[in-house]
Image (tube, helix red, strand yellow):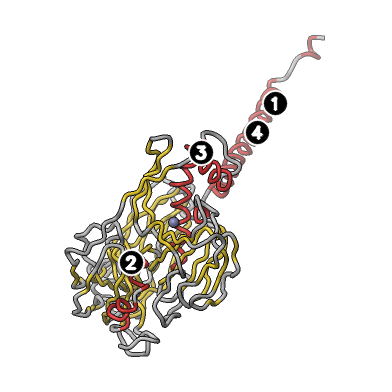
Amino acid sequence: MLKRCRVERSDIAELIGDYNGVMRKGILAVFALIVLVSIALILTRSATPVVELTPPIPSLGQATPVTVRVLDPRGVRKISAFVEQNGARYQVWETTEPSVATDKTWTFPIGIKTTPQLKDGNARLIVEATSNDLLRKTSHWDGEVTVVTKPPAISVDSDQHYLYLGMADLANFNVSGSWTEAGVRVGDQTYRAWPVPGGKGGFFSLFAFAWNMPANTVPLVYASNGTGNDVTSPIVFQFPKKEQPRYTVHDLQVSDAFIQKVVGELDPNGSGDPVARFVKINNEMRRANNKTLSDLRFKTADHFLWSQPFARQAHSQAEATFADLRNYIYQGKKIDQQVHLGYDLAVTQHVGVEASNDGRIVYAAPLGIYGNCIVVDHGYGLQTIYGHLSHLDVHEGDMVKRGQVMGQSGQTGMAGGDHIHFAMQLDGVQIDPKEWWDSHWIQDHIAKRVDLPGFNK
Ligand SMILES: [Zn+2]
């Protein structure tokens, strides 16, 4: 019995050998698996960077700031920028500091200051980004740029420009050299340059000195070649001392009935304190509506659509004038204050609303506090605005003639009685209409400087 149970030494050795073999194969298999999984992980987790240039760069000058944004879930190991021109490739910037940020921007200057080999003319800008992982995938952005080594030059008319707060004027100027954008800048507002009509050469801008512009602001003609360096030249101007308009202050009594009317019409689904809702409409909705109006500057004709002075609504009484300061009084307390940027012209109820001049309808729809609203474009960024209509008879795109009835007056929007809110804007900035009703002013300020049909030079 004992003998049967005996296990030979050689058998044990064989068994151990088999065991070791199995173990070795197992370890190898596990090791291979780990390697495979790691490779798979690297492959699936490795990323390709996305390179963007914001804003796009049309041209390079002395030292044009270039902003590169790179999106990469692994971060970025390296970014390089190159300019290729006439068969040569210049490295113009590089960073090799790894970043783990998944969305990061870098801003650096490129231009002839750092790369003097660049010449005026076409070139290609290339930005390469390398991902911050083991595979180091690289992707790039590239695009055409124009190298401009000389700034544009401006010469401005030597006219004395008489400016009034809230009013407009016209400046003539010339721009030479390479430029992408030009016009008149007053503070933070810009007014486009247009070629002088009639193919006479040179440019002009209609510009405004806004009602709230600090009086020491100097209007400038500017030209930019898109390389980050604007050239500017001041306009000779003067404020007539005595004649500055004095804006009047009005207390406007706000009744519960008026608040209910406004809130019910402009915030029908709102809830809460009606006075708070009224004030919110008067501020937030007013701002949004004014932005909509201002953006209509881009829907303008590149020529004069009119040839007579602007007309004021016939037989109308002005109940409020431009830039009146309004205090809103409710139950003896001031709840709000706004500046009224137009004329409130009243005639009779549902009077026909007349186009102030020839033009094209660029807006005819409800617009918040302005109620049913019409905007007529007259060309070169000059537009008239009509608010609170009860009925609209025109559509966007229609051409209208001076005096043409476009709808009926009413009290839609933030209006307490039937009247026309009449306003004007120039390149999106609301201005005082009163000079445009005056043919002498148009003659002296516009027609003497550019050919205006219907007027003598
Ligand atoms: Zn008004």
SS at mark 3? helix
Structural crowding at the residue carrying mark 3, measured as other residues with C-alpha within 10 Å and reported as few (<14), some (14–19) or many (≥20): few
Between marks 4 and 2 in the image, the one whose residue lies nearer the viewer:
2
Q: Is mark 2 within 8 Å of ligand 1?
A: no
Residue 408: image quadrant is bottom right
Q: Residue furthest bottom?
A: 199
Residue 324, position in %: x, y? 34, 54
Residue 331, position in %: x, y? 43, 34
Residue 203, position in %: x, y? 31, 81
Label 4 sits on residue: 21
Which amino acid, mark 4?
Answer: Gly
x 24%, y 71%: residue:
231
Q: Is residue 290 left or right of residue 210?
A: right
SS at mark 4? helix
Label 3 sits on residue: 256
Label 2 sits on residue: 190
Front one among 291 and 281: 281
Estimate the spatial distance between the alpha carbons at disc 3 and disc 4, rounded to whole Å: 95 Å
Which amino acid, mark 3?
Answer: Asp
Residue 110, position in %: x, y? 29, 66
Front one among 230 and 2: 230
Structural crowding at the residue carrying mark 1, measured as other residues with C-alpha within 10 Å and reported as few (<14), some (14–19) or many (≥20): few
Label 1 sits on residue: 15
